[in-house]
Amino acid sequence: MVKIMIAPNRYIQGPGVTKEMGNYVSHLGSKFFFIGGPTAVSIVTDRILASFRENSLDCHFEIFSGECTRSSAAELSEKARNFGADVIAGVGGGRVIDTAKAVSHELNSGLVILPTIASNDAPCSALSVQYTDSHVLDRFLILRRNPDVVLVDSKIIADAPTRFFVAGMGDALATWFEASTCTKSNAKNLPGGVTTCAALNLARLCYDILMEHGVSAKLAVDQDAVTPAVEMVIEANIFLSGLGFESSGLAAAHGIHEGLHALEGAERTLHGELVAFGTIAQLVMENYSRKEIDRVIGFCNAVGLPVTLRQLGVVDISPDNLMKAAEVACMEGLTTHNSYFEIDPELILGAIIGANALGEATQKNPGG
């Protein structure tokens, strides 16, 4: 089996790097079409413009608050084409980033990603998750290549609401366990090969950073502070988790996330929050030791990630309702099937119920 590892061409992180953006991206082109939500655009515009003027770069900011769909990508592609863009820049969170990727893919243009929150590992990947106009998962669009530049201003990340930072840790929490599963099953990674030693070890490093520095980083971000721990966790959330999932593979945690997302009450829950619970369910399903599961649940409790269905917003926890999530998680094409054993809805249902029971026990008895 061929080993393949992919990554963004350049990853740049530090406080204030947005102000130097022109210096980092001028080699890509001269006309930049920015796509971002209103808050994200308001945060970065003034920081960016001076360095763009210094580098004789032209830019247009397009406000986008919608879902990443084929229709929204087509509409924005037409606007970018009319502007004469040779580089697309996505500014904001996951939906905007996925939309910018889809537009860049359509135009075969350069791609720059500026995440303003560290809520997931989307920025570095060659993947765009698209939904239908009725908010149902449509497809995973595989891009021709990874972003040319990922620019992460750690001060902007620290200034954002802490919930997003914590959700990013929830997404990153799955990386090592899913990578380990895919290694056992010899599952293909996103580019169609199997993991490399480098990608697998980066996935492990991602987990180790969370365990060692996650709580300290969360407390610092509560105060809008950038500390060495914050810098390390930002790198884990965005870079290490991105490389880890893309080049090592996804498994049940993300498949269960898709199932949970279909349950009433979970609509407002962030991607990483659902993945965190999905990770616990995966550990239950794979019969990890109680010590390892307790460590993961303890970490989630310490940083504020959900460990129960109730915390996800799901009120109806009857087996009949949870079976809906289990059936979605087992749909053909989802990464649940990267497990190293046969998957069926009953197995997933048991894992969800078991994970919820373990989480609930820690709420009744915080000491264990």
Image: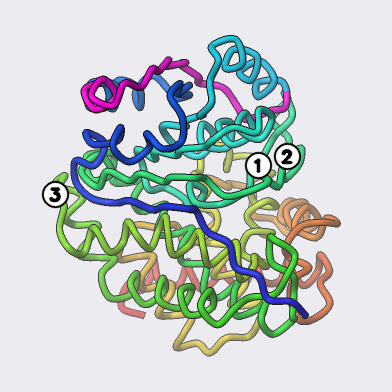
Q: Quadrant of the N terminus?
A: bottom right
Can I make out residue 352 in this image? no
Residue 253 - label: none
Q: Nearer the viewer, residue 204 or 278?
A: 204
Please name the residue that numbered disc 1 is placed on: 129
Q: Residue at x 24, y 27 (%)?
A: 51
Q: Residue furthest top?
A: 82
Residues at circles 2 and 1 in contact by the CB criterion of under 8 Å: yes
Above or below for 346 versus 115: below
How far is the residue under mark 1 from the one under mark 3?
32 Å
Label 1 Cα neighbours within 10 Å, binned few <14 / some 14-19 / many ≥20: many
Q: Amino acid at mark 1?
A: Val
The quadrant where residue 351 appears: bottom right
Above or below for 90 versus 127: above
Pick whichever of labels 1 and 3 is earlier in the sequence. 1
Q: Residue at x 45, y 59 (%)?
A: 170
Above or below for 191 versus 286: above
Pick whichever of labels 3 and 2 is earlier in the sequence. 2
Q: Which residues are magenta?
A: 50-70
Label 2 Cα neighbours within 10 Å, binned few <14 / some 14-19 / many ≥20: few
Q: Decide whether residue 55 is among the magenta residues.
A: yes
Please name the residue that numbered disc 2 is placed on: 137
Q: Position of residue 154 (x, y in %)?
A: 25, 47
Q: Quadrant of the C terminus?
A: bottom left
Residues at circles 1 and 3 in contact by the CB criterion of under 8 Å: no
Horizontal side of residue 219 vs 294, given as left or right: left
Residue 225 - label: 3
How far is the residue under mark 2 from the one under mark 1?
8 Å
Q: What secondary structure is found at the residue carrying circle 1? A: strand
